Structures are given as C-alpha cells and as structure tokens.
Image (tube, rainbow, N blue to C red):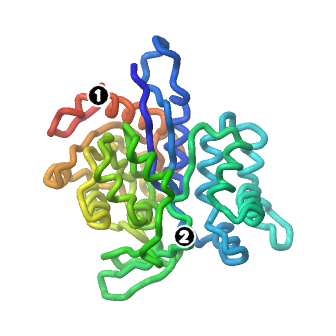
Amino acid sequence: MPSMKVVAIGGGTGLSTLLRGFKLHWPASPPGRGRSPSISGLTAIVTVTDEGGSSGRLRKDFRVLPPGDIRNCLVALAEDETLFAKLFDYRFKSGTGLRGHSFGNLFLTALNDITHDFAKAVRVSSEVLAVRGEIFPSTLTDVRLKARLANGRTLTGESRINKTPTPIRRLHLVPHLAKPLPEALSAIGEADLVTVGPGSLYTSLIPNLLVRGIARALARSRAVKVYVCNLMTQPGETRGYSAADHVRALHEHAGSSLFDFVVLNTAGFPGRMKRRYQEEHAEPVVNDLDQILALQVHPVLADLVADDRVARHDSTRLVRLLLEMASGRSSARGSKRPTGR
C-alpha cells in the first residue's frame, strides 16, 4: 500500500480532532506491513483569526498571533500525549492575570517574544513535543475578519461574526493582502490529499482560503481534494445551511471550484443530543445530494458520528475513509454518483 502526503486545512476543534486520526497512520508503515493506507508527510495549515478567550487576551496584550488553535494542533500531533502534552493543554483556574490562560498559549507567546518569529516559535514547540508532521499558521500577518451581512451591515472580529443571527453574505480579511508561508504553499503543491474541515465555516475554514495564494494553490493542486462537511449547523454562522450551501460558500470565497469530494454523515443522533442542539437552534446538516452534484462535487456518505456527549466526527473512521479515497480504494473515486459506505 503506497504512502501519501496529506495537508489538512482548518482550525478549531475540528482540525485537531482530524489530526489525531491522521497521526495514527504516520509515519508510514514499512513496506509489506499492514493493509491500511499510510502517510509519509502530514501538514496542518491553521487559521489565525481567533479573538476570544486566552488567545484574544494574549493577542491584545502582546500583539502575538492567536496561539490557541496552533496549540490544539501541537497537542493533537504530539508523538505521545503524555505529561508534557497535557502540560501544554493545562489551563490555569486561578491567579491574577493567569486565570483562563493555557500553558501552551503562554509558551508560544513567550517563544514569539524571544524569537520575534511566530513560525519559529511553532517549530520549536513542535520539536519539544516531538510532533508528527508540520504545523503552519495560514499567514504571519496580523489579520482580522470583516463580514458583510444580508441586511447590508458589516461586522468586524471573529467573536462578533460567529454570533450574528443575520446571514453572512461575504467574508473579508483585514488587511486583505495577507501572505501565506511559502512552506504551506509547497505542501499543498506536493500533497496527494488535501482536506478542508470540519470546522466553523466562516471563522475556521474560509479565512484560510482568503489568505493570498492558498485558494489558487489548492485549485491548481493535483491532490484529491475533500471537504469534510460539519455534522451540525451553527446558529451564529450557518443556520439553515444545507451541505451544498457549505460547499457553495467555500467555492464563492475561493473564487473557483476546489473540491473533488464532500464527505457527508448519514448517522442519526441520540434524541437527548438532538434536543439539546435544537435548544441552541442548531440541527443536523441536510444532505441535498442533487444540489451537491450540480456543483460538480461528488458526495461520499458514511456513518461518522463519534460516541460522545457532543456532535463530533469519529476521527478514526473519518481518516480511514479519507485515506482510502485518496489511495483509490474507495469506489467513490471514479464515480459521479453518491457513494455510500
């Protein structure tokens, strides 16, 4: 079974959950061992627009890029999530000025202050945690989000955008000419599989595509390109969005069609979980297959819900499916019809 290079683009808990699944297949098994697809290279490209919580406070006080999503990816890809990885995830519960901060966020902030290079701070942290793979912020520019809403108003800042009850028509980066890391573009160009999602559509996924050059590199890439659709709508960003609405928003902001496949969940949710999400005005994403096919994207259907208290993908099943698709083992690869598993 040939090994492959994988690039995962996103942010938030969705990206770190996916990376934990990919880590199980990297480094590649020696030839002749094992039947599952394996990975010879793994790269995470992470959004840097967070303005809430610990990241937001550090961003304001130290003018550092928000470290929270990067920290989550570092912990997810740590070779062995033992004591030091747990230390990176440790969050202070008391202390003047410390309460609410995680140790990893403070560590990255201190390294950035010493090196004056956030990318180097991430590399050093990766070495400390013996990370499997590489992690790049999507840009080193201090960017913020601005959204134009359906009612004509504009909102600035991730924390305001992800709570708006009014539909989002267009998202922008400020400044709009933010440059990507060359290493991130190279990784996309060399990849066999590129995934986008799961994650918050307007505050974790689209911001990466707005960084100058990333969408173009993705469109030109010869990799198998897959969007992993969210399980649930988000009341502040995607209320009422179907699966096709998610894909359409990604393509419109990228300026071109990007994806070969979209992975959709077919499993139901326990009644208690479904009722809790309904109280929050969230609901399972509708799989409108005809509309997805009209976008010239092939839907791949699978039972992907983890046995958890929250609606979350089962990373092991999801990653196995993605690697099979990229290696040509999935019947979806050559089919224009919805594929079920």
What residue sits 41% from the left and 64% below the top?
Answer: 234
Q: Residue at x 55, y 35 (%)?
A: 23
Cα–Cα gap, marks 1 and 2: 38 Å
**Location of residue 242 with respect to 144 vertically, above or below:** above
Disc 1: which residue:
328
Which element carries disc 2, helix, strand or loop? loop
Position above or below: 134 against 115? above
Tell whether 142 sits left or right of 263. Answer: right
Kind of element beneath mark 1: loop
Quadrant of the snapshot with the N terminus: top left
Can residue 100 be seen here? The reply is: no
| Number of the front mark, 1 or 2 | 2
The reply, left or right, for residue 25 in relation to residue 87 is left
Q: Earlier in the sequence, mark 1 or mark 2?
A: 2
| Snapshot quadrant of residue 119 | bottom right
Front-lying residue, 165 or 226: 226
Q: The disc labelled 2 sits on which kind of residue?
A: Thr
Q: Is residue 92 visible?
A: yes
Q: Residue 22: x percent and y percent?
A: 50, 36
Q: Residue 141: which numbered mark, if any?
A: 2
Q: How many marks?
A: 2
